[in-house]
Amino acid sequence: MTAETDLSTPVHVCIVAGEESGDQLGAELMQALSDRLPGQVRFSGVGGERTRALGLDSFFDMSDVSVMGISAVLARLPLIIRRVYQTVDAIIAARPDILVIIDSPDFTHNVAKRVRKRAPHIPVVGYVSPSVWAWRPGRARKMRAYVDELLALLPFEPEAHRRLGGPRTHYVGHPLIENVGSMRPMPGERPDLADGKKVLLLLPGSRNSEIKRLLPTFGETVARIAEADRDLEIILPAVTHIEAKIRAGVKDWPVKPVIVSGQAEKLAAFRKAHAALAASGTVSLELALSGVPMVIAYKIDWIVRLLKELNKVLKFASIDSMVLPNIILNDKPIPEFLDNEANPEALSLRVLELLSDTPERHRQIEAFARLDQEMRLPDGHSQRGAAADIVLSCLKDGPIASRTGGSAS
């Protein structure tokens, strides 16, 4: 949709993000709002380098609350709690026209709840849905009390919130669909499987804990794969902050990967690759949109493992997959292995299936075509534009959905 605005006075938008990907979404939203309201919008809140570069007046350094994983959140919980109250006080004092909270629900949703109690007149837009469709579905209904409109990155989330009684939810597209052109091979970049060396990507994760748990298993798996197929090139894209740890971890591997760093080299590797062995996470969606068949592995920390066991009795979670393309497609074309199932023997057998012209490989490639259709926005719409239009609608007319009634759609 396109929001027609007649806003004639300066607009104050408060944006609260808690980690890097949220900061990126916030920056894109700021740019889209500034394009629509040139010279008429100012920003404050909590953000990182990208949002601050576009003029966000940040209450404090976002790194204070930028933590991921249950263990890490618990370790920094006292500071996070202080920052929540500081952020709420700053928002109330700033009296913005609208509050946009972006991802990082342990931080941003606690801010929004308290702002709603103290300043119920401020519209609240949530950007990125918590995984209520997977974990603790009761959160959806609770969100309705403090989130007026929710911007979803995954196409099934509006229906999930409607079913669970959550806030009105709008699919605005995933950031990755804006960049598929740079992720997909040009002619000749990804040779036919029969035309020379096969390229296998290794993606053991972007956090220290993931590297510690998965890298040794991936090394043993690669050794088995190389014994069965010696005409193989192995590429490992590494994020900068853990590159040294990865290099130390692979130095004794009998078959060493080529380690690349930086976004440009990562995308070049994606365009070249024939298959991938990866940790669970957003990277599975990146690989699928790049057309790279994959096997997914994950080993969870002890707290999540305990909760997983409790779930068998208490039923916190409501899905049986940890792979985003599988969840979006409501299918399981991508094999996934968790904890003890993620062993070198099992992983190597499934990866080898993808390095040949097999039904398993074709099934994934066909599924990727369906994924494209599921994630596509209407022609002429962009993610940043769709998100900005919802925010402008709230600014002009108030929340699209009543705060006290209505249903998600």
Image (cartoon, rainbow, N blue to C red):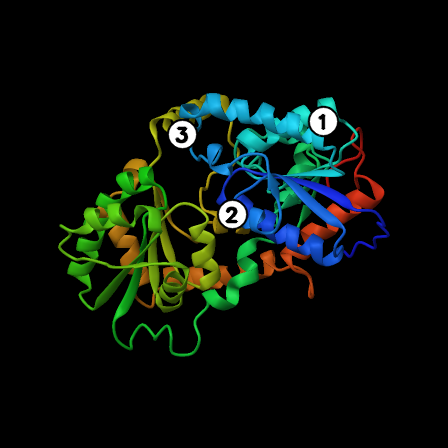
Asked whether the residues under the numbered discs 3 and 2 touch, taking CB atoms below 8 Å apart as contact, a structural biologist would say: no
Amino acid type, residue under disc 3 in the picture: Ala
Amino acid type, residue under disc 2 in the picture: Glu
- Percent from the top left, x then y, of residue 306? 38, 24
- Of callouts 1 and 2, the N-terminal one: 2
> Which quarter of the rendered picture does the N terminus lie within?
bottom right
Height in image: 332 above or below 142? below
Q: What residue is drawn where x is 44% and y is 75%?
A: 186
Disc assigned to residue 49: 2
Frontmost residue, 28 versus 188: 28
- Residue 357 visible in rendering: yes
- Percent from the top left, x then y, of residue 90? 65, 29
Mark 3 crowdedness (10 Å alpha carbons): few <14, some 14-19, many ≥20: few
> Which quarter of the rendered picture does the C terminus lie within?
top right
Q: What secondary structure is marked by label 1?
A: helix
Disc 1 from disc 2: Cα separation? 27 Å
Residue on which the image places disc 3: 72
Disc 1 from disc 3: Cα separation? 27 Å
Disc assigned to residue 116: 1
Q: What residue is drawn where x is 54% and y is 34%?
A: 60
- Residue 154 visible in rendering: no
